[in-house]
Structures are given as C-alpha cells and as structure tokens.
Image (spheres, grey):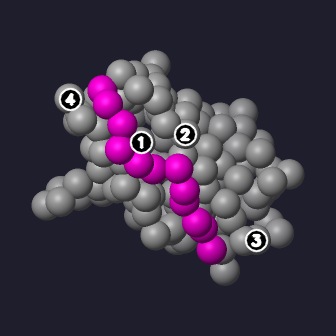
C-alpha cells in the first residue's frame, strides 16, 4: 500500500510559479512511477506529467510542456511539480498518483494509488 500526500497548492496570479510536492509513505518509492493529474468541476481528471522510477523518462501533457517540470528525490520519498508561467486555465485540484511499475504512464487508469489533492487557483 502506498499513501501519498500532496502539498504546495494555493492562490497565485497569472505568470506566478508554484511547486507542488508529493510525499509517499512507502519504502519502495524508488521503484514506482509517479504521475500528476488535475481536475476541474464537471470534467474528467486529466494527465499533466509523469516520471519513471529513476527520473530518466518524463512525459508532459502538451498544455503544460515548457512551463511545468516534474522531478523526484527518491532519498526523500518525494516527487515534485514545478509550475511556472501559470495561467488561469491551470486552475484545478492537482493529484499525485503512483503505480506499481517502474515505467511512466499517462492514463489515470494505470495508477492504483492517489493522494487527496491540492487546490491550485490562478487569478487573471
């Protein structure tokens, strides 16, 4: 069982930056892939970014590429999502997820473990 806790959300203005953190309570964090997803009311949860177990393989959604950076520190059991040049359309609840395989995944169905989410609000 993997428990995930997100932090770092908040209210910012367009153009600002935020860094989200996802801390896992598992000794096997270094062997699992991590993904970030986001969801707005009435819409399906959408893929944002994913990173494999070592950090060597990363994939981004087109909407965030060149603005967001996913990373991980396996020694701290933590993954990060650095979000720069935020836009109002980035407003959502952001979720961290983990899967019991090493490779990255961009579909929410591939992930068995989810955090509780953290709200990011970007004002114009």
Q: Which of marks 4 and 1 is in front?
A: 4
Q: How crowded is mark 2: few (under 14 residues within 10 Å), some or many (20 or more)?
A: some
Circles 4 and 1, Cβ within 8 Å, touching? The answer is no
Check disc 4 and report the residue beneath it. 124
Under circle 1, the secondary element is: strand
Q: Which of these two is toward me, 23 or 53?
A: 23
- Whole-percent x, y for residue 83 in the image: 47, 32
Q: Earlier in the sequence, mark 4 or mark 3?
A: 3
Under circle 3, the secondary element is: loop
Range of the magenta residues? 3-14
How far, Cα to Cα, is label 4 from label 2?
Answer: 19 Å
Q: Earlier in the sequence, mark 4 or mark 2?
A: 2
Check disc 3 and report the residue beneath it. 26
Q: Residues within 10 Å of mark 1 (few under 14, many from 20)?
A: many
Q: Residue furthest bottom?
A: 1
**Residue 6 makes an appearance in the image:** yes
Check disc 1 and report the residue beneath it. 48
**Residue 104 makes an appearance in the image:** no
Residue 19 numbered mark, or none: 2
Q: Which of marks 2 and 3 is in front?
A: 2
Under circle 2, the secondary element is: strand
């Amino acid at each position: 069982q993997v428990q995930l806790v997100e932090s770092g959300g908040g209210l910012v203005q367009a153009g600002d930056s935020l860094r989200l953190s996802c801390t896992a309570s598992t000794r096997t964090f270094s062997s699992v892939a991590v993904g970030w997803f986001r969801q707005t009311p009435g819409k399906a949860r959408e893929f944002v970014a994913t990173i494999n177990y070592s950090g060597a393989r990363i994939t981004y959604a087109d909407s965030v590429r060149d603005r967001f950076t996913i990373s991980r520190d396996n020694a701290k059991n933590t993954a990060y999502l650095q979000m720069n040049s935020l836009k109002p359309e980035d407003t959502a609840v952001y979720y961290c997820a983990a899967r019991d395989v090493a490779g990255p995944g961009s579909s929410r169905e591939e992930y068995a473990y989810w955090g509780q989410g953290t709200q990011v609000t970007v004002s114009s």
